[in-house]
Amino acid sequence: MLLFTALLFSLCHSRSFNEASHLREFMDSPKPLKTTRDALWSLMNSNNRKPTSVYVGSHDELMAADKINALPGQPQGANFDQYAGYVTVDPAKGRALFYYFVEAHEDPTTKPLVLWLNGGPGCSSLGNGAMQELGPFRVNSDGKTLYSNPYAWNNVANVIFLESPAGVGFSYSNTSSDYQTTGDTSTAADSYTFLINWLERFPQYKTRDFFITGESYAGHYIPELASLILKNNAAAKNTVIQLKGIAMGNAYVDGDTNAKAKFDYLWSHALISDSTYKNIQSRCNFASPTADCEEAISSARNEVGEIDGYDIYAPLCNESSRHAKLLSVQQLQPDPCSGMYVNSYMNLAEVQQAFHVSGHLPYHWSSCSEVVDNWHDAPATMLPTIQELLGSGIRVWFYSGDQDSVVAVTSTRYSINMLNLTIESQWKAWYTNDEVGGYVIGYKGLTLATVRGAGHLVPSYQPDRALVMISAFLKGGF
């Protein structure tokens, strides 16, 4: 048991186990990495106004083969169908994406279809989104059994959790060079191919209202995929995918804005000193950082100390917190060590068998990819793409947990301000259980909702408020 505990705590602080570290590494990457969005549009053959050529495989009987009877350690009483498996997106290279799908508790034939994407880039929507945030189950501290999440989003929708790109979670490619050329362009293309093929496997959802949701670096994934869907629908002169809206949580959309907003947030929450904040303001032009700027930022990091940047008020995962969890009655409370339990659970042979995982993966499952380590392309800002989406008629929401310093609510507000949108409904509180759940403001074509008391992983920190928020999004407003 001591060896097991030591291994878990080692994992807790490793790169592959920390979604925040993946995003920070990306944000600190050299500027040449961040290319324009033109490569993405080249996928569309826009000059010819023809739909993108997409591989579509045979899916006969695959839906039935993907059905999960029950997950190991699953609690009694689950009254919904769940599926998992692979969808091939490039047969020549042997590239396939893994998905986990849960139908709604009630009336799945009438409820919308929602795709959930975690960010990173390179982190798992299964291990993070499904097993720690909005899925129907969470993993107990024994790393072997599950307990129910009464605030799961399949209370209001049918939800797909997609592990993308290849190399993330159980998704893979038989062509190892794919892992060295992964970026925004290939991720959007593969996710689109996945959706087209998934709808062939589950044809009953072809006419269903479809929404894309996610968090963090999904602030890139979501608008890029949404734009690809809309352009292909237009080129085909047919609504191939019934996209109705997108919702992005604590979304990383503009690099320079996010860098400035982070330190504004840290100062306003009394995590750095006045003098350090003034030094950052005077020395830092985040579009072209200097040595003086790096020195000021280093001082800020030292002043902040050892906290969870994803939730500035949350406890850290350590031996004391794990011991307290083992002694406590199971509650749906944020657990700083939950990622450890998920890592243990997802690497059990019986769990992988239940999920219909390929037996040929050359790596173990991890929360964030250990093989996708060279992000090839990414626009420096997603604001032009978001501006285009605002004119398309689909619903566009940002939501932000207000205790996240990695992609702070200040970053989201600054980014929205850069769009220069007209306010259509004034700032107001929204409620759940007779308490303020957060605040909401409506712009022309866009809504911002905050979630009070939540960190970066909103459905994990405030599951009941997150469910109220996403229900409002699906309905069109609070």
Image: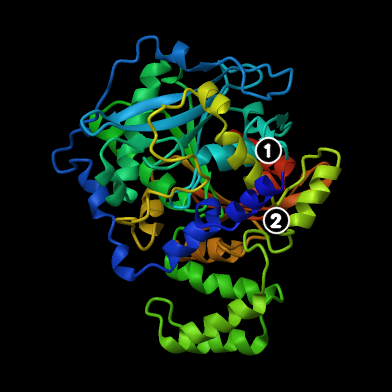
106 lies left or right of 176 = right
Q: In terms of depth relative to the viewer, which is nearer, 219 or 414?
A: 219
Q: Quadrant of residue 49?
A: top left
Examine the rendered structure and indicate whether residue 295 appears above or below residue 247: below
Which image quadrant: the N terminus? top right
Q: In x, y percent, where is residue 40?
A: 27, 48
In the image, 89: left or right of 462?
left
**Amino acid identity at mark 1:** Leu
- Label 1, secondary structure: give it: helix
State the image quarter where residue 152 is shown: top right
Labelled disc at residue 467? 1
| Left or right of 30 in this view: 20 | right
Q: Which mark is residue 239?
A: none
Task: Tell me if mark 2 has few (under 14), some (14-19) or many (20+) residues whose alpha carbon lies within 10 angstroms of its own.
Answer: some
Q: Residue at x 13, y 38 (%)?
A: 48
Q: Is residue 442 visible?
A: yes
Question: The residue tagged with tag 2: helix, strand or loop?
Answer: loop
Q: Which residue, given by chain and number where applicable, does mark 2 sit on?
A: 317
